[in-house]
Image (cartoon, helix red, strand yellow):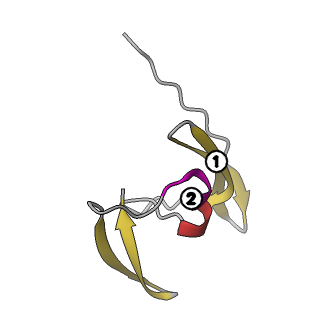
Amino acid sequence: MTSTQLWLNIEEKHGLPFCTISLFHKGKVLEIDNVLIDTGSGGTILKMDCVEEIDISIEEDDTIETISGVGGTEFVYLK
């Protein structure tokens, strides 16, 4: 049997919850600071420029969708 542990340090900034996340991909690790925890979101969106550092990029079988928000409309790919 395996167990999973989750350690989450939440810091409040401007009345909003932020944390640091660690991404693991193909033997590489990337830590991203100041990630907003959006409790009303159905998913997590990360900027492509950040995750390309550990070779996460769009692949042939990825789904492309359009998202809209206060900042406008963007194309995203799903992993």
Q: Are marks 2 and 1 in contact (CB under 8 Å)?
A: yes
Q: Quadrant of the N terminus?
A: top left
Q: Secondary structure at mark 1?
A: strand
Tell me the amino acid under the disc marked 1.
Leu
**Mark 2 / mark 1, whichever is N-terminal:** 1
Dot 2 alpha-carbon crowd within 10 angstroms: few under 14, some 14 to 19, many 20 or more: some
Looking at the picture, how far across and down is residue 9, in whole percent? 67, 42
In the displayed orientation, state which residue is furthest to the front. Answer: 60
**Tag 1 residue:** 30
Is residue 24 or residue 37 the one in the foreground? 24
The residue positioned 29% from the left and 63% from the top of the image is 60
The residue positioned 50% from the left and 40% from the top of the image is 26
Q: Quadrant of residue 12?
A: bottom right
Looking at the picture, how far across and down is residue 23, in whole percent? 56, 45
Looking at the picture, how far across and down is residue 13, in whole percent? 73, 63
Q: Is residue 67 left or right of residue 11?
A: left
Magenta span contains residue 33 = no
Looking at the picture, how far across and down is residue 48, in whole percent? 53, 67
Q: Is residue 67 left or right of residue 36?
A: left
Magenta span contains residue 54 = yes
Tell me the amino acid under the disc marked 2.
Val
| Residue 13 seen by the camera | yes
**Tag 2 residue:** 51
In the displayed orientation, state which residue is furthest to the bottom. Answer: 72
The residue positioned 39% from the left and 59% from the top of the image is 43
Dot 1 alpha-carbon crowd within 10 angstroms: few under 14, some 14 to 19, many 20 or more: some
Q: Which residues are magenta?
A: 52-56
The residue positioned 50% from the left and 62% from the top of the image is 38
Is residue 43 or residue 53 the one in the foreground? 53
Q: Secondary structure at mark 2?
A: helix
